[in-house]
Image (cartoon, coloured by chain):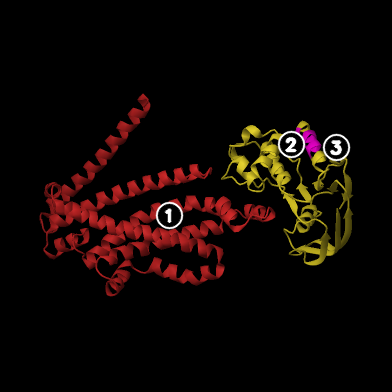
Amino acid sequence: MKIQINNLTKKYGDKVVFDSYTNTFEFDGILLIKGISGLGKTTLMRMIAGLEKADKGEITKNAKSISFMFQEDRLIPFISVLKNLTAVCSEEKALHYLKLMGLENEKDNSPLSLSGGMRRRVALARALCFQCDLVILDEPFKGLDEELKSTICEIIKEESKKRDFIIISHDSQDAELLNAKIIEL
Amino acid sequence: MISISEHKVTIKKIIKIALTIAFWLGLWLIVYNIVGLDILIASPLDVAKRLLEFLPSGEFWLTIFNSFKGISLGYIIGVIIGSIFGIITAFSSTLNTLFKPFLTAVKTTPVVSFIILALIWLDKVSVPIFITMLMVMPVVWANVTSSIINTDKSLIEMANAYNFGLPKKLKLIFLPSAVPAFVSACKTAVGLGWKAGIAAEVLCTPQNSIGINLRNSQVYIETVDLFAWTVVIIILSLILEKLLVAILDLCFKKIMAKGGYFIENTDK
């Protein structure tokens, strides 16, 4: 995967997040974007995913379709866990990823009835079951305990054989767990 | 199975309602005795007698059926038009701006102005239908529009990120977000529509309607009839409201269950 960022400028009012920022992300598998909060990691990923426009500059990438897992779970509260997934993929695929996440018994429940960690895993399952070339995960391990985190790292590592991943994190240890390339913003 | 404490609560509630009714009937009787003029205030006993006289009469039930039919038709048309335009204006800010003065005008203009205007345009039977529709439509319209506009923006962004088409966005995000507000608007509009519909009947006097009976009571100074018909209107309004609320709740639950939605109808 190659993502080229040329002279990117992004402001929110008077706050300049990026000022003529140029960089190239070239990786195969998993790329971990690291940096203290407020540096614009999420903003940059949102621009890569096309969710936000840059004020100036351009981003070129060789990914046709991108799956984006937000920092918040953003599950649709009106429908079941399974329906949240079938909204983006087939039922067979949805059930496969729910099973991977250990949530097959929760498929008919409302997302509101789940714990924070469970909701995070449903959001991750949704991001994974979406057909794409690149998966961007914004703080995917937020609210997960160490055991769950390492299980999910294994799932991501396995999935990264099929497509590339960019993961936003402020924990360097995540890179080791994921065997990921690190870029510090 | 009802527990003893629940049973006690129900009895207490019934006693409270009975005492409240007794208080107001008592007050009515006192005022009637103080005024002492049947032409100004009818006796509660005379009104009760007149109501009992109404009951076996076929004409009475036909009258109720006609008013009920016309007002219900106007209500249903109002809900349908309000919902359709509510959805349209929610997705088009230009149309929303364009229709805002119209909605404000309908909401602020006295209903009697519309009734008189409708009397020029329409036949007697259609006026109550039109007026009920006109009163119900803006309530549903405004609620549907605002609930869609206020849909959680983060969910809309998520839907865009996962390439949801408009039908999917409508089915999974916009409509479930709007349903509780829609049901609530339908409930609020029942009373409004009923009162406006009866007012229209009084002014346009369609045959065999509650309105013409109210009007005749006034013309022939039949105060007992006027009070009796007013009681009928109040009772019917309560029944209509309870009935429609029950139907709406049932439909809401069925649709939500069929669509596999988890939506709490908090407006009970």
Q: Which mark is residue B185?
A: 1
Q: Nearer the viewer, mark 3 or mark 1?
A: 3
Query: What residue is disc 3 on?
Result: A177
Asked if badges 3 and 1 are on one and the same chain, I answer: no
Look at mark 2 in the image and give the residue it sits on: A144
Residue B194 visible: no
Residue B201 counted in the magenta span: no
Quarter holding residue A17: bottom right
| Prevailing secondary structure of the magenta residues | helix
Question: How far from the left and from the top, in percent, is residue A97?
Answer: 70, 39
Left or right? Give the position of B255 relative to B38. Answer: right
Q: Could you tell me which residue is drawn at 80 percent across and 34 percent down?
A: A150
- Secondary element under disc 3, as helix, strand or loop, is helix
Q: In the image, residue B253 lies at what x, y percent?
A: 45, 43
How packed mark 3 is, by other alpha carbons closer than 10 Å (few <14, some 14-19, many 20 or more), is some
Chain letter of the yellow region = A
Mark 3 and mark 1 residues within 8 Å of each other at the beta carbon:
no
Q: Amino acid at mark 3?
A: Leu
Q: Is residue A144 above or below residue B148?
A: above
Q: CA distance from mark 3 to mark 1?
A: 53 Å
Crowd band around label 2 with a 10 angstrom C-alpha radius: few (<14), some (14–19), many (20+): some
Whether labels 3 and 2 belong to a single chain: the reply is yes
Q: Quadrant of residue B116?
A: bottom left
- The region drawn magenta spans A148-155
Q: Colour of chain B?
A: red
Q: CA distance from mark 2 to mark 1?
A: 42 Å
Q: In the structure shown, which secondary structural element does the residue marked by tag 1 occupy? A: helix
The count of marks equals 3
